[in-house]
Amino acid sequence: MKGNQNARNSYKDASRTEPPRLTKVAITLGICCIGVGVVQAVMSWMFLPEQLNACLFLSGIHLLLCVISIIFAIGALLETLIARRTVSSGVSHQWLRRAWMGLGLTVFSLLVLNFLNMAMVGRIKIRPAAHALSCMSNLKQIGLALLMYIEDYNERFPAPGANWEEVLYPYCKNSDIFLCPSDRNGLPSYQLNPSLRGVVLGQILEPARTVAVFESDDLKTVTWRHQNGAHFCFVDGHVKWFSAGTEKELNWD
């Protein structure tokens, strides 16, 4: 009997050294918040703005976990303060430190969430603008290469049936300029105006208004990739952005 009583007392003393259940939950939720924050950071860096909905969903899960974790952390602090009357001072201080750790993890996760959301907004705004500038630069280089080709080939545009990217490559030495950063199809992102194939440059009455190269995914129609618009390179070499639906106003012959 005495042995059983001693065992029970030892079990009670051991259980008193364990932190309250709410403290364990608060710490676990705090760690989960940080884990979700890491996943959100990776997705925001690698997949924005293409996977914006998924990133926003993770942001919502992150915020929900933070709110729940704060509730449990506050409950753990209250539970610890109440339990200080029934356990030794050293044990209660240990519980209190763990309860504060759970709250600290959550507050840190909230700061990470706020930083990630600001980074997402900035990336959503900056990345498309950077892609548009890169696309415009590509077309300017293509336009310059096209003018150099025309000068070397009796003032004529590439002949019908010729691979215009290949014939222009010796003049630009960079195949990357034929792919827009916003194009995920892996195909050439631009198309030479079919109406100008084999045409003599001197026959074009308005070079500054006649489209030479345009953005296209299917190599036939205009693709509006940048803020509901697209870039066009004209025969004289300049590049300009036009909003969707304005291609009929441009000169194609």
Image (spheres, grey):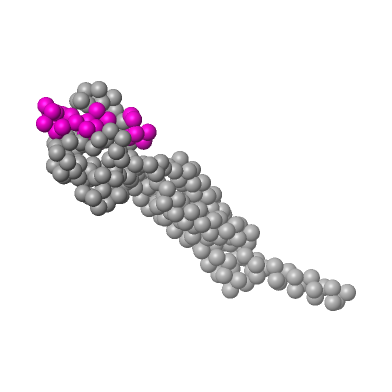
Q: Position of residue 114 (x, y in %)?
A: 39, 51
Classify residue 145 by image quadrant: top left
Which is the main secondary structure of the residues drawn in magenta?
loop
Look at the image and tell me in which quarter the C terminus lies: top left
For the magenta stretch, what is the residue range?
Answer: 193-221
User: What residue is rendered at 57% in x and 58% in y?
Assistant: 28
Q: Position of residue 213 (x, y in %)?
A: 24, 36
Residue 7 position (above or below residue 45): below
- The residue positioned 26% from the left and 48% from the top of the image is 169
Choose between 208 and 18: the one closer to the eye: 208
**Residue 250, relative to residue 86: is it above or below?**
above
Q: Is residue 201 magenta?
A: yes
Q: Count the marks: how many?
A: 0
Task: Give the x, y percent position of residue 229.
Answer: 28, 32
Q: Is residue 11 visible?
A: yes
Residue at figure coordinates x 75%, y 74% from the top left:
10
The residue drawn where x is 65% and y is 70% is: 17
**Residue 67 is a magenta residue:** no
Work out whether residue 59 or residue 136 is closer to the camera in this orientation and state it: 136
